Image (spheres, rainbow, N blue to C red):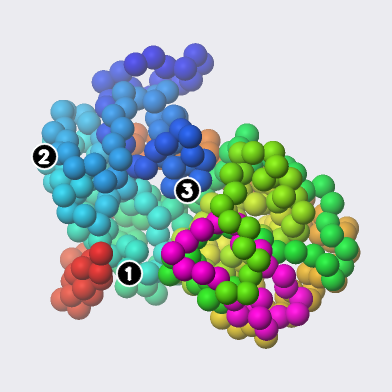
Amino acid sequence: MSLRRGSPRPRNAAMTTVHFVYPRDATRNSSPFCIGNEVGDRLARDYDVRFYGWRDQVTIEPKPGDILLGHPHWRRDSVFDRSVNRPGWARRILMAPYADDLRQVAYYDRHMEQCDLFLAITGNYWFDRIEASPIRRWKPKMRHMDLAVNRAFFPFVKTRFNPPGERKFLYIGHTAHNKNVGYLSQLQRECDSVDISWAGRGRKKIPGVHVLGFMDFSQPEARAKVAGFDFMITVGAMDANPTTILESMAWGLIPTVTMQSGYENRAGIVNVPLNDAAAAELVFKKLQARTDAELLETQRLGQEAIDTHYRWDRFYADVRAAIEGSESPAIRKATWTERILMKTFDLVH
């Protein structure tokens, strides 16, 4: 393995092998592939890396000093599940999205005691509320991993806003339960100040919204279509922190999101109430009435946040600190009630 010229060599990098388990596809910039791509590429500069898909059905037999890093799968015959208990790992680090929804995260509990750290990919809303969640015993191992965006794939395109009262909203994504798309339909039906279009596809329909279908945002014509919108909207009820929020903000749209989509009181992002159309309409009316100068200032704050915080180098620095570090906090044993709860939701898959 060769290191990129000028990159610092980590401690014992020449001897360290990192086994990285995460969805990864160089032809796709959407989540979860962007995480696997961005982190994987940086790992390969610093370590000897072995890549695995999270569904792979192999068992890794570690050599002395080897690191296991990545995303488990709910299937018990997948690579993380089959390998994490093998003796000889120098570090075991779980890295995966987190929201307070046991349907999404209960199966992590199988591995939490064996792992040294849990790098929780999530927004500040969820991380700040761990103590009130059913997984609070994991907290000593949890480290907050705020997401990032690559401007090379999501360039700035929004140079002007539509006139007051004519501003448009764009939802980008699918229709899984954590996206709460029924609320989008309700907003479109009951709020006079919102007009929602949907770019994406899913197993369900979103009645009432304007359907654009799948769009390839690597293409200039798709990004030109995006530039005609003013706000990105997502109204998840149990969503860790969708990458579409940061991607849209990089384009120059103003994200309008429920706090349960991960972001609470963040610069450049407007919060909208969850499952309360009347209260949401008040937010939409204010957005429709804002001056261009006010919208441009919100946009500027978002661009500043992209440039200073939502960066993959910052994200990777936290991953590398977990690899190079020695932290491995103990967590208390699960109570009988917690064990039953986790097993019940683990079986959902």
Residue at horizontal 55 percent and vertical 56 percent from the top:
200
Real-space Cα distance between discs 1 and 3?
20 Å
Relative to 88, residue 298 above or below: below
According to the picture, the residue beneath numbered tag 3 turns out to be: 31
Q: Amino acid at mark 3?
A: Ser
Real-space Cα distance between discs 1 and 2?
29 Å
Q: Residue furthest bottom?
A: 278
Q: Secondary structure at mark 2?
A: loop
According to the picture, the residue beneath numbered tag 2 turns out to be: 87
Q: Amino acid at mark 2?
A: Pro
Which quarter of the figure has residue 133? bottom left
Asked if residue 321 can be seen in this view, the reply is no
* The N terminus lies in quadrant: top left
Residue at horizontal 19 percent and vertical 42 percent from the top:
57
Q: Is-magenta flag for residue 178? A: no
The residue lying toward the viewer, choosing from 241 and 67, is 241
Which mark is on residue 102?
1
Earlier along the polypeptide chain: callout 1 or callout 2?
2
Relative to 44, residue 197 above or below: below
Q: Secondary structure at mark 1?
A: helix
Q: Please indicate whether residue 99 sits to the left or right of residue 105 in the image.
A: right
Real-space Cα distance between discs 2 and 3?
32 Å
Q: Which residues are magenta?
A: 185-206
Q: Amino acid at mark 1?
A: Leu
Disc 2 crowd, CA 10 A, few/some/many (<14, 14-19, 20+): few
